[in-house]
Image (cartoon, rainbow, N blue to C red):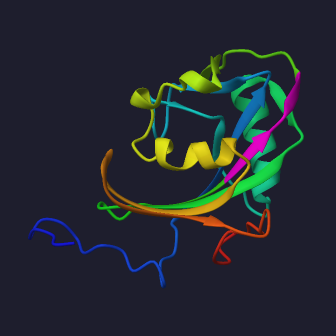
Amino acid sequence: MATDSHSPAAPDWTVWQPVERGALCFIVSDGQILLIHKKRGLGAGKINGPGGRLEAGESPAAAAVRETREEVGVTPLGLRAAGVLRFQFCDGYALWCAVFTASGLTGTLRETDEALPFWAPVTAIPYDRMWADDSLWLPHALAGRCFEGNFWLAGERLLTHDIRVTTGGARDISPPGNSF
């Protein structure tokens, strides 16, 4: 892909390293998916699943559970590793993200200063109000397929992407690097 003189070269995913690591959790129950209106941080104003950054020494699965509790007040049940996403932004920000699905929850759903939760039919996910990449990989997660994806973005604009469905079930989703 050609770039203009104002854009950096496309990432070399074979040597890519993230600046931050995160996790997302999508709870699906009775044909509905739990989504949030994100109020602050990366993606503020967009719709997504609960999630956030990994804390020092925290596993991706533990982060998915903790972030879901913090953002919407519930604990996901039946957590399943779905995939790994790598995001490289033209401004230099690089994010590695583990994606999980869950089959249920416990607790009371509530709004917080971070997120306004809501249920949407799985058949009517509002992709037009989400990140441009979500419609490319979320269907794989919802279908129970494991995947890996690389995404290069200029702000919110998706420049290039590569998504691979992986075989053999959920793979080990350990974040790269040792900066915990």
11 or 33: which is nearer to us?
33
The vertical placement of 171 against 74, above or below, is below
The vertical placement of 120 against 47, above or below, is above
Query: Percent x, y for residue 5?
Result: 8, 71
Q: Residue furthest bottom?
A: 15
Where residue 72 appears, as percent x and y from the top left, is: 72, 24
Quarter in which the N terminus is drawn: bottom left
Res. 50 image quadrant:
top right
**Which residue: 46% across, 31% down?**
127
Instruction: Check the image and name the residue furthest to the left.
Output: 5
Task: Report the number of discs.
Answer: 0
Left or right of residue 84, residue 46 in this image: left
On the picture, is 128 further left or further right than 40? left
Relative side of 110 to 79, left or right: left
**Residue 177 percent across, percent down from the top left:** 64, 77
Is any atom of residue 138 visible in this view?
yes
Q: Main secondary structure of the magenta part?
A: strand
| Highlighted magenta segment, given as a residue range | 99-106
Q: Is residue 114 visible?
A: no
Name the residue nearer the viewer: 94 or 127: 127
Res. 128 image quadrant: top left
Residue at position x 75%, y 43% in the image: 101
Which residue occupies 81% across, 39% down? 102
Residue at 69 percent across and 25 percent down: it is 34
Residue 105's x, y, as percent?
Answer: 86, 27
Q: Name the residue nearer the viewer: 76 or 39.
A: 76
* Residue 80, placed above or below residue 10: above
Q: Quadrant of residue 125?
A: top right
Magenta stretch holds residue 178: no
Residue 102 is one of the magenta-drawn residues: yes
Quadrant where the C terminus sits is bottom right
